[in-house]
Every structure is written in structure tokens, then in C-alpha cells.
Amino acid sequence: MEEAIATLSDGLVKEGVVLPWDFPPRAVAVLLLEEDEHALAWARRLPEASRVIARIEEAARGIVEGHDEPAPIRIARERHGLAGDIASHAKVRVRAPSKTRDRVWRLTTAPATGYPLLALVLAGLFAGLFFLGGLLSDLLGGLWSAYASPVIRLAVHAALGENVAARSVLWGVDGGVNAVLSVGIPYVLTFYLMLSILEDTGYLSSVAFLTDPFMHRLGLHGRAALPLVAGAGCNVPAIMGTRVLATTRERILASTLVCLMPCSARAAVIAGAVSKYVGWGAAILIYVIVAGIGFGAGWGLNRVLPGRSTGLVMEMFPFRAPCYRTMLRGTWLRFRGFVWVATPVVLAGSLALGVLYETGLVWALAAPLAPIVEGWLGLPAVAGLTLIFAVLRKELALQLLLTLAIARHGAGTTDLLQFMDRGQIFTYALVNTLYIPCIATVAVLARELGWRRALLISAFTIVLALAAGGVAHRILAF
């Protein structure tokens, strides 16, 4: 290389040409061998152009013969190597200490450790929901039944007397509030708190990374895991979050799976009914069944819907210590929406169901549901009405069932086993978990995908719920 440059540099001096830009001969020779357009244009304008061009071509051939690559590429390679050699002598490498959050990030994304950690996180989430939610449920429900309920019943009977109107009002102001305190607040609040912890630590990006290979089997990619995880809190923002997906096909797939994801309201029903009266193993079984149905539905839709999934490129956020103020604020904002929206719906639904029950209309309305609810699902026909009411809010199903139990067996009653057996509670919770999330979810589906697709997804979930409930009633025994 240096020999070719020196030969061309000496040749330029021998030709006696006036070098451009006051450059030294070596610099001009390097530019010519690099095929610099300005240097070559200068050479072609020289009176001695033919001899200079011949010297350039001869030097370039020498580089090709010696290094088996064109002169411009070889010069760039030599320059880069020389720069690296200078840099290696001029700098001192210091190994930066590994930060704790970097080590945690590697542990949560490496398959060997990431999947076991994910299983532990999910187990901790469910355990916290069931046990902490159960403690709050017993505490709040017990306090209401012991201190508030007797006073309210006396006040209502004193104002309205012992009649249908008084008993109907008690369904709302006593049984309804008791149901909110025993089911809605304990489990929803606990779930939102744990979800805020996962969000604030940055763990959800690791979940997306780990689930990417699994999601591809469903025609999606890891980014779809974020709406699915968000769906564990509420399906409405989760479906809105599917906008991050690239194609309509992916949004349809993800939205359908979000509708099958147990949200906090349905988790409250699972925790407040199944784990409490049937056992935590049965509650986990519901999640396993729903996960299996969701995987089967996604696998099938991936093969039916035209198109193919896209790849995943996403930013991985670093782990951080949770900010308790931010975490508690996020929990409160979510929970406040539940309190202000769900509580009036629960009270109004309890009051309406109370009027139907006390006037005897509930049995007339439940009769047409008997072939499906009693014959296929093995549930009391009146339970079908609570499932219909639950389209407004999914936790309303259990709260209305609890209100029915309270109305039948007294204010101190919070035991659903006096109204349904263990197998019926399991089937009821499974059906409630699978069919249409709520009317708000249907509205968002219509806005995102159109009414036709929203109604098709809703009908699909109803068919799945009825099929799974009927099969569970026949093959599972508790």
C-alpha cells in the first residue's frame, strides 16, 4: 500500500505538475487512488493528463494485485485499522460496574430465568388478589353487616313499613352496598394496586419481550402482550391500546383475545366467589381454562383470517424503583373511576332486581332462560338474569347473586353456598368470565373495528362461554 502511494507521489513530482489546493504530493496521490471526483477532475484537465492517468492506473493495479481488492476499499480499510490502533493506545478501558437494574433486566429477559420469574410474578399476583382481597372482603362486609345494616333496615322499615316497597329498597341500599363492599372494592382495589406496581417498575416491557415467540403462534407479536396485560385491569383501554398494532388483522386478533382476558371486574368474581367458596385451586383452574380457550381461539383465528403477522421492534425500558406517590395515584385514578361508575350501577341493578324479586316478576322473566341456564349450564334460572344484568358491569353478576342470597337468608348472609353449590359457583364464574366483557367494551370495539366486527366478537364470546360452561358442568365435580 505505502509503496503504491509513494510510487504515484514520486511520479507526480517527476511530471512537474502544479499540485492542487497546495496539498503535498502524498495527499494528492491518496485522493487519486481513492477515486476522489475532484482530484480526478483536476488530473484530467492537466496538459500531462494521459501520463498522469497512466501512473494512477498503474499504482491502483499494484494495490489490487497485492491485496485482492480495489484501491479505494483497501485505503479505507487501512485508515480504519490505523485509527483503531491509535485509539487502542490512547484510551484506557475501565469496566463499568453493573447496575442492579441492569442485572434485573437481564434476569427478566433471559429465557432461562425470565419465564420462571414471570410464573412467580403471576402466582404472586393471584395470591395477593385472593388472600389480600379476601381479608378486605371479610373485614368490610363484616363491619357493614354488624353495624350499618341493622340501622338501615330499621330506618327503612320505620319510613316505609313492612311491605314490598321497603324490601325492594333494602335490596339496593343494604344488599347492594354490602355487595360492593364485599366484592367490588376489596378485589378491584387490590388488583389495581398490584398492576400499578408492575407498571411503575417497568416489568411489563420484559413481559412483552418474553411472550413474543408465544404471540407469533397466535398471529401476533410481543407488543400485543401489553394490551393483553392492560386487559387484566380493564378491557376498554386495552382494546384502545391495540392501535399500536400495525394491521387490522392484528387488531381483530388482539381485541378478541382481550375480550377473553379476565379483567379486574371478572377477577373480582373469580376471587370473591370461586376462591372463597370453592378453593383457590378451582380459581386457578378457571384461569387455566380461559387461557387454553384463548390460545385455541387465537390459533384458530390466525388460520382463518387472511394475512400474516409482522415482526417486533420495541424499546426496552429500564427497571426502576417504584415511585410510591405515582403508584398510589395511578391506583386511585383507576379505582375512583370504578367507585363513581360501578357503584351507582350496582345499586340501581340491585334495586331493579329487588323489585323484580319482591313482586315475583323475576321468576316469570327467568323462565325463558331455564332451558339454557338450568338445562345446559345446571344453574338456577334466576342466575341467568344476573348474567344479563352483568353486561353493564361484570362484577355486578356476583354482587347481584350475593344480594339474592342476602334477600333470601338475611342481612348477615354472605355465603353463596346457601344459594348455589360449589360446582354451580364454578360454572357461573366461568361463564361470566368468558362472555361479553361489558357494554362499554362492546362500544369501544364498535368504535375501533366497526359494529359488524364488534357484534361478531360478542357473539363468539357468548358461544364460547355457553360451550365451556356446559362442558364444565358435566365433567367437573367439586
Image (tube, helix red, strand yellow):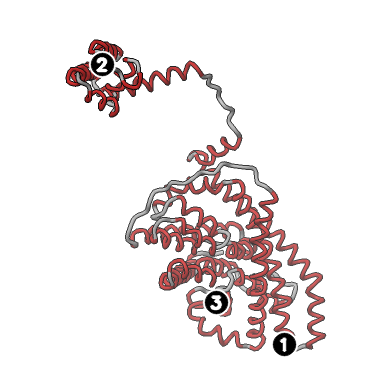
- Which residue is at 58% across, 79% downward? 382
Q: Dividing the picture into quarters, in which one does residue 420 lie?
A: bottom right
- Which residue is at 42% across, 71% downward? 456
Q: Nearer the viewer, mark 3 or mark 2?
A: 2
The answer to whether residue 43 is above or below residue 248 is above
The residue that mark 1 highlights is 165
Q: Is residue 111 left or right of residue 300?
A: right
The residue that mark 2 highlights is 17
For label 2, count other residues whose C-alpha is less than 10 Å away and answer few (under 14), some (14-19) or many (20+): some
For label 1, count other residues whose C-alpha is less than 10 Å away and answer few (under 14), some (14-19) or many (20+): some
The residue that mark 3 highlights is 388
Residue 416: percent from the left, percent from the top? 65, 70
Label 2 SS: loop
Q: CA distance from mark 3 to mark 2?
A: 96 Å
The answer to whether residue 17 is above or below residue 431 is above
Residue 426: percent from the left, percent from the top? 56, 66
